[in-house]
Amino acid sequence: MQKLIGIALAVIGAFAVSGIALNRGEPINALWILTAAACLYTIGYRFYAAWITARVLSTDATRATPAERLDNGRDFVPTPRWVVFGHHFAAIAGPGPLIGPTLAAQFGYLPGTLWILFGSVLGGCVQDMVILFLSTRRNGRSLGQMARDELGPVGGFAALFGTLAIMIILIAVLGLVVVNAMKHSPWASATVFATIPIAMLIGFYMRGIRPGRVVEGSVIGIALLLFAVVGGGWVDHHPVLRTWFDHDGPALAWFVMGYGFIAAILPVWMLLAPRDYLSTFLKLGTVVLLAIAILVMQPDLKMPALTRFIDGTGPIFSGKLFPFVFITIACGAISGFHSLISSGTTPKLIRTEADVRLVGYGSMVLESFVAIMAMIAATLLDPGVYFAINSPLAALGGSPDAAVATLSAWGFPVTTGQMQALANEVGEATLFARTGGAPSLAVGMASIFSSVFGARLLAIWYHFAIMFEAVFILTTLDAGTRVGRFMVQDALGQFWEPLGRTSWYPSVILASAIVVTGWGYFLYVGVIDPYGGINILWPLFGIANQMLAGIALSIATAIFLKTGRARYCWVTGLPLAWLAVVTSTAAWQKLFSLDPKIGFLAGASDLGEKLAAGALTMEKAAVAGKLMVNLRIDAALTAFFLLVLWAVILDMLRIGWRAYRGEPLASAGEATYQRTQFAGVANA
Amino acid sequence: MPDRSVVEMTRRALAGFCARLRDVVSGAWGLRAYEQYLRHLRAHHPGTQPMSREAFFRSDQAARWEGVRRCC
């Protein structure tokens, strides 16, 4: 019976995938994509993941997990499987899978969709599950500790610095997305600003007024957030108030930096924790609502399967389909960041090893599904509108009029009148060059929601979507800055012990300032960049994130080699090889491509030449020096990521060589077997 | 007119599903951390005076934010 269902699914899935892939010329319905996704995910989960847990990992339901053995009622707690699933999904789901597919849609809907589906089923889900399992076997050890134990000091160093670097780049790019969404938009700015006092109010409510009543607090908070969306509209229509919230990019960048600094030094209960409760509720609610709305609306995708920009001349970001579609999709298919969660809080909650498949593989399937929905929301827009929103004006000729002419000549017809009408409908002054993915996703989501739940409310839905993304992003920004602060304090503590004390205020302020300066620099340069900064920062983030995935997969492969599972090492080895090829190619092109739009170094010298020749406008000449320095820093960072990735891979290959030679290798740290005391679990 | 027992079964299944959903959501958000802590104390350290809900919430919330908690 199982096999019959499997065969049926495989046939439907193959039919849907080939339907998507072979369809040319006429618009395709989003239901095709949802069908293909549902079949692939089910096959991946029921067959591939089940095979991995049974044969490769040999999960053992009779074995007591650390949650059972070390149960302390606090962080180690044996927890029911669906609860761990919810906890893990809430932790891994961030704004990345919403932004990546939106940008990658410039190649058409097909490449991104295929990579989201196959990349997650064969790569991302496998990584999350395997790391979760390995950490569970090792009493919940972190990725950094496992890297040190299994690969040696180089691996440990790589994991540590890789994590810090990716955090810095991630926060910078997310900050840039928020800034671009709020730029000269009083409605969006007022709503996003309002989320901060609302979060603090809920923080005080949960701590002082009704301690520990999280649900009550969150419900009030969500109601206030919705009110803030409507209130932003009133502010926007008020002649005086609206000027208070009408700011340009640099001013908003400074605001975001100040916010990040304050959030990192305030106690968690005041801002971070309540904001996180709100964003998690909002996140799940919106994802479910979006899925329902897409099912009801069944939109046609207007974007072609492939666009002309697969040749690397895209206006949103430069670079050919290979390797940049993989770098751009990033978190929706495979995200190195997830391995930090899989080796963090989650392994301490796993009640039995039998739950590893649902929690590790299943959560990533859901995350990948979110990415698919973002892809649908981006590609149901008119391609002309999509490109006009997401491309920097500098890439389309410098002005809205030139932009529509360029786009129409490319075969994506759009008019300034159409853009202005759309902007009026969503309550914005303009929608041209709103780079970063958030405004275009918001337009897509708003058109889905409003067609299902009421067309009059397009402006409200648009600003709801912006608020939703901003709350998400600011949560990651707070939490990331705080983690960075702890890491910097840990490092500083090596030099002078008091600096390592996490609650000593001079050290807290110093370390927070260092972290905020780090990401603030990239954010600021991104804001003043006439090309919008996203085209530089997002690939850099993609490379960093895939590098971290490479480290995680190397650790897993090394452990397979050490524990006599060499013949299965392709399970993590093949995704690793693919990531190594993709990431190295992308990093190499970003470093050495002679095309100034792709290569950082070529870009810097091109800018220098134009500046010397006086070929730049006043505006561009004023920032050219800063941009040149930044491009060289980006090049150095890319080289560093590439070196770290290959150092770790070579370390892993060294272990493989020793295993091949038959030298004795011991995997450190696996806790000794103890039989579980839970009744029924062992037989389940 | 559908059979009574079918209606009753559907109602029960729905109620069970909702209860389970509530469990999952409240568990995943750490909403029952205090009850969990009380259960742990009773099972493993009988006789210890437990912290109040307020005091527990304060210490628990700080502990929850050690390490990487949120992704991209």
Image (spheres, rainbow, N blue to C red):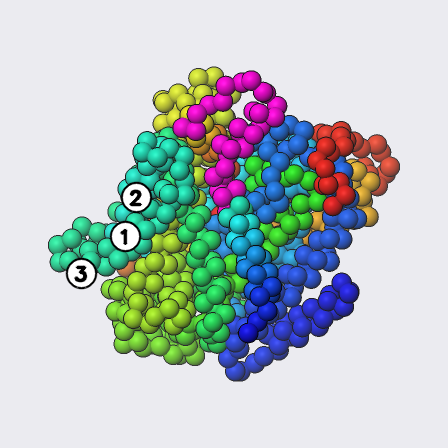
Q: Where's residue B13, x and y in %?
A: 58, 57
Secondary structure at numbered mark 3 = helix
Q: Which residue is mark 3?
A: A237
First in sequence: mark 2 vs mark 1: 2
Q: Where's residue A301, x and y in %?
A: 48, 74
Judged from this view, the residue extending furthest toward the right is A662
Alpha carbons under labels 2 and 1: distance apart = 9 Å
Which chain hosts label 3? A
The mark tally for this picture is 3
> What span is colored magenta in the figure?
B25-54
Q: Are marks 2 and 3 on the same chain?
A: yes
Alpha carbons under labels 1 and 3: distance apart = 14 Å
Asked if the residues shown at circle 2 and circle 1 are in contact, with their CB atoms under 8 angstroms apart, the answer is yes
Rendered residue at 74%/45% (across/down):
A684
First in sequence: mark 2 vs mark 3: 2
Between disc 2 and disc 3, the foreground one is: 2
The one nearer the camera, A194 or A392, is A194
Q: Are marks 1 and 3 on the same chain?
A: yes
First in sequence: mark 1 vs mark 3: 1
Alpha carbons under labels 2 and 3: distance apart = 22 Å
Q: Which residue is mark 2?
A: A198
User: What is the quadrant of residue B44 in the picture?
Assistant: top right
Asked if the residues shown at circle 2 and circle 3 are in contact, with their CB atoms under 8 angstroms apart, the answer is no
Which chain hosts label 2? A
Amino acid type of the residue tagged 1 in the rendering:
Ala
Secondary structure at numbered mark 2 = helix
Magenta span main SS: helix
Tell me if A52 is positioned left or right of A333 in this view.
Answer: right
Badge 1: how crowded within 10 Å, few (<14), some, or many (20+)? many
Which chain hosts label 1? A
Rendered residue at 52%/59% (across/down):
A371
Give the numbered dot on residue A228: 1
